[in-house]
Amino acid sequence: MKVALGVCVTFCAWLFRPAAVSRMRSLDMSQVGSWGGAGDGGKQIPAKWRGLFFLSNVKPNGSASPLIGLDTTLCEFDAAHRVLRCPVSAMLWATARDDAASTARKLAAARVSYEYRFDPKFEAALITLNVFGFETLARLGLVWDIAKTSNDGSTLTRCSWTASSAAEQGATPYERVRRGGAAGRASCYKARRVAVDGRVTSGLLREMQRATGSSVGRFE
């Protein structure tokens, strides 16, 4: 009994350690050029997918999400399989929102991560959502796609579908976003690059500051 209890305690400690020891770090948006899109994790991915992206994300009820950005340079890239893995620590949060820290902590506790499975030309990717190491979207009958919708990669479009509606729009993420997403047949939002390698898009930075205030948070 003691051995079983010890194993259970050890497992729970391992499972919830990321949420227990992590804290929301405040990042000054006026200094985004020094920290945004400056990580080492995604340097192998094509330049058009690198950087800190501002997510104009809206919840189904119409309210803004506290998840406001994603820094792909803090993700891990598997070049052999063309997969980009992004943990909670690569996400940026609108800390002015009361629910930002609690939401980030819950995702960290659940070991949530996104995986972007790119096509051979790196035009688009199928997104998988992992919870406790298990892929969940397929189990829920959902498909998430993301594709470049500008030649330089400064704007990405992410669309959500049911599995049946996704099949009607095309066989690949690129086809589905270009066809169904543009026609308004899915729930989509834009991800736009604010900073990468010390370069900042000033107009977009001001827009992000209007949405977040003077700082954002990163749960690490």
Image (cartoon, rainbow, N blue to C red):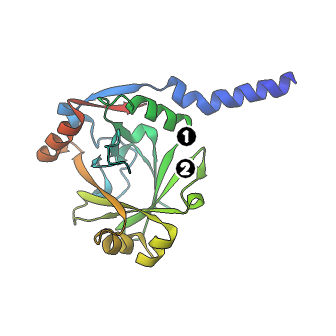
Question: Which residue is labeled 2 in the image?
Answer: 130
* Quadrant (top left/top right/bottom left/bottom right) for the N terminus: top right
Find the residue positioned furthest to the front.
61
x, y percent for residue 111: 55, 40
Give me the residue at 18% from left, 45% from top.
199
Q: Name the residue under label 1.
A: 111
Is 168 drawn above or below residue 41 in the view shown? below
| Real-space CA distance between mark 1 and mark 2, rounded to the nearest whole angstrom | 8 Å
Query: 162 or 112: nearer the eye?
Result: 162
- Secondary structure category for the residue under label 2: strand
Q: Residue 99 carries which label?
A: none
Image coordinates of residue 76 in percent, x first then y, are: 45, 48
Q: Which amino acid does label 1 sit on?
A: Arg
Q: In which quarter of the image is the C terminus?
A: top left
Q: What residue type is labelled 2?
A: Asn
Q: Residue at x 72, y 25 (%)?
A: 9
- Residue farthest along the right direction in this orientation: 1
Could you tell me which residue is drawn at 37 percent across and 56 percent down?
A: 45
Marks 1 and 2 close (CB-CB < 8 Å): yes
* Residue 78 seen anywhere in this rendered image of the structure: no
Neighbor class of circle 1 (other Cα within 10 Å; few <14, some 14-19, many 20+) is some
Is residue 64 left or right of 108 when viewed as pictured?
left
Residue 2 appears at what percent x and percent y? 85, 21
